[in-house]
Image (cartoon, grey):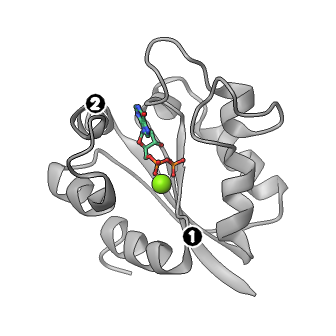
Amino acid sequence: MTERTLILVKPDGVKRGLAGEILRRIEAKGYTLVAVHLRTATEDVLARHYAEHVGKPFYEPLVEFMMSGPSLAVIAEGDRVIEGFRALAGPTDPTTAPPGTIRGDLGRQWPTTVLQNLVHGSDSSASAEFEIGVWFPSL
Ligand code: IDP
Ligand code: MG
């Protein structure tokens, strides 16, 4: 089923010059880029985007990291792209993410644990719809 997902190249990925490599992998898989937008997240955007994590020990460091520079927000479209991009990204922790995945190939443990893991991808159709509205309010 054709669907859309919200992908972020997080500030570490943009700073390290990996936005192009990450977009390349999305396109090489056959997904279509529908919209891209470079922007530095505000606290309000992050409070909505990461609502499920408010109150967790890593929430404040996560917000600080996400406000440290621009992220590349991407809407990608394709057959089962929500699940497919999560597979391309790999598991949350770059140290144990398998080679072949974005986090496994390009992520690294240093300088922080887990936090700086290059990308975000929506995890369900409900979150994709919600997150697209958060990052692309005019669409
Ligand atoms: P996901 O990005 O793989 O879906 P989530 O559990 O939704 O992972 O966590 C959101 C983001 O919060 C992660 O991508 C990562 O940047 C950060 N994060 C998650 N767990 C930890 C942790 O234990 N320590 C530090 N940062 C974390
Ligand atoms: Mg998540």
Q: Is residue 18 left or right of residue 45?
A: right
Q: Judge the density around disc 2: few (<14), some (14-19), many (≥20) Cα neighbours within 10 Å.
A: some
Callout 1, which amino acid? Thr
| The C terminus lies in quadrant | bottom left
Q: Secondary structure at mark 1?
A: strand
Disc nearer the start of the sequence (2/1): 1
Residue at the image position 16 percent from the left and 49 percent from the top:
43
Any mark on residue 68, and which? 2
Q: Is residue 32 visible?
A: no
Q: Judge the density around disc 1: few (<14), some (14-19), many (≥20) Cα neighbours within 10 Å.
A: many
What distance separates the C-alpha of mark 2 from that of mark 1?
24 Å
Q: Nearer the viewer, residue 27 or 103?
A: 103
Label total for image: 2
Dividing the picture into quadrants, the one containing residue 112 is top left
Q: Secondary structure at mark 2?
A: loop
Residue at the image position 28 percent from the left and 30 percent from the top:
68
Report x, y in % for residue 103: 66, 34
Dividing the picture into quadrants, the one containing residue 83 is bottom right
Any mark on residue 5, and which? 1
Callout 2, which amino acid? Ser
Asked if residue 65 is positioned above or below residue 92 in the image, the reply reads above
Residue at the image position 46 percent from the left and 21 percent from the top:
113
Q: Is residue 102 visible?
A: yes
Residue at the image position 38 percent from the left and 76 percent from the top:
130
